[in-house]
Amino acid sequence: MTIAPPRAGASFHRSHRLRRTAALRRLVRETRLDPSAWVLPVFVDARASEVTPIASLPGHARWPIARVAEMAERAAAAGLGGLLLFGLPDEKNDGRAAADPLGPVPAALRTIRSRVPDLALIADVCLCEYTTHGHCGIVRDDGAIDNDATLPLLADAAIAYAAAGADVVAPSDMMDGRVGAIRGALDLAGHVETAILSYAAKFASAFYGPFREAAECAPLFGDRAAYQMDPPNAREAMIEIAADITEGADMVMVKPAGPYLDVIGAARARYDVPLAAYQVSGEYAALHAAADRGWIDLRRAALESLTAIARAGADVTITYFALEAAEWLRR
Ligand code: PBG
């Protein structure tokens, strides 16, 4: 049996009409990429005297304090929205080094602030880069994390970063109650205008592997499953976000991004504060690794992944692709 071709006026939807040319596709695009909504993660290393490439994050490096403003200048020239700063200290201890006003993050904030005014400066707040054991909080004798004892250290770190010029502090430790503790401490110290971007729904993910190499913060024992979220739980993510907004978060984040687009979509539908998503190190490294083997086209895959994150509902995307993707959009 042959099927007759459709008659003129046949009643089916001709979706191809608006896909026919690049101009038409561009015109009806629902989601547009905009580098001003991207945040570039930057690693500042107190021990480095030279820019030290990070093997697990192609194109990224650990920056010495004296040169980190160059990175900020590049980000500003590319039209990026901001930087997210991570620090590697001279020496790790019980985590108190995170609050050292002379530490890598405050020092970087001061030099960037004085040289590159028009960029949002976000400081990651966590102890894991500053502890000898690599966990995000104070560890008790029995090996468990002491949530409540960790809160004042996080608050002290947030104050040090606010004092050094951070526009936003971003707690990534996943301790309960830290947003409230940080907000209260910032206000008491007079930093009422410093905003909080809470890593509200941060999952215990396999995709953080390359970052832990970059920041030298892989836990020496155990894992982070007792404080970061269990990957199967999307409803619980809504509870985490609600709690952080109640405690005073100005913006909230879902992390990782690509494998958690459903969580981003649900958070966008439910909450009205600005929503950030973090395309993490493993998402970035996996695309690079596949592209190196010739299995995917890096530029197309990266832009597609960033489009998916924006389409799911993220207002702000933290991504290691920020600089090169801004460049791709210009060409
Ligand atoms: C610190 C922190 C981590 C990341 C951001 N902040 C590591 C972790 O939780 O293990 C991961 C970022 C990435 O993978 O790009 N707690």
Image (cartoon, grey):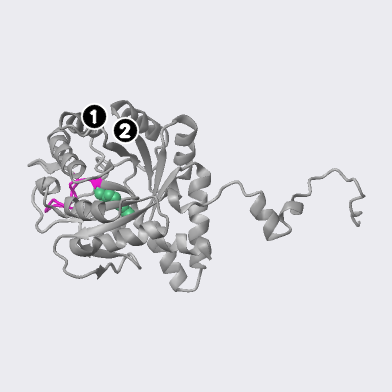
Residue 220 picture quarter: bottom left
Answer with mark 2 or mark 1, whichever residue precedes in sequence. Answer: 1
Quadrant in which the N terminus appears: bottom right
Mark 2 closeness class: few <14, some 14–19, many ≥20 residues within 10 Å: many
Q: Any magenta on residue 105?
A: no
- The label on residue 12 is none
Relative side of 193 to 16, left or right: left
User: Can you give x and y, in whole percent of width and height, for residue 19 in the image?
Assistant: 71, 55
Number of numbered discs on residues: 2
Residue range corresponding to the magenta coloring: 124-136
User: Can you give x and y, in whole percent of width and height, for residue 277 in the image?
Assistant: 40, 45
Q: Are marks 2 and 1 in contact (CB under 8 Å)?
A: no
Whether residue 321 is visible: no
User: Can you give x and y, in whole percent of width and height, for residue 286 in the image?
Assistant: 41, 62
The residue depicted at 31 percent of the width and 58 percent of the height is 72
Residue 238 picture quarter: top left
Mark 1 secondary-structure assignment = helix
**In the image, residue 232 above or below residue 210:** above
Residue under circle 1?
180
Q: Amino acid at mark 2?
A: Ala
The residue depicted at 46 percent of the width and 69 percent of the height is 291
What distance separates the C-alpha of mark 2 from that of mark 1? 8 Å
Mark 2 secondary-structure assignment = loop
Residue 25 picture quarter: bottom right
**Residue that lies at the very extreme toward the bottom in this rendered image:** 293
- Taking depth in this image into account, of 26 and 92 the one nearest to the observer is 26
The residue depicted at 56 percent of the width and 47 percent of the height is 31
User: Can you give x and y, in whole percent of width and height, for residue 328 in the image?
Assistant: 50, 64
Mark 1 closeness class: few <14, some 14–19, many ≥20 residues within 10 Å: some
Residue under circle 2?
249
**In the image, residue 106 above or below residue 168:** below
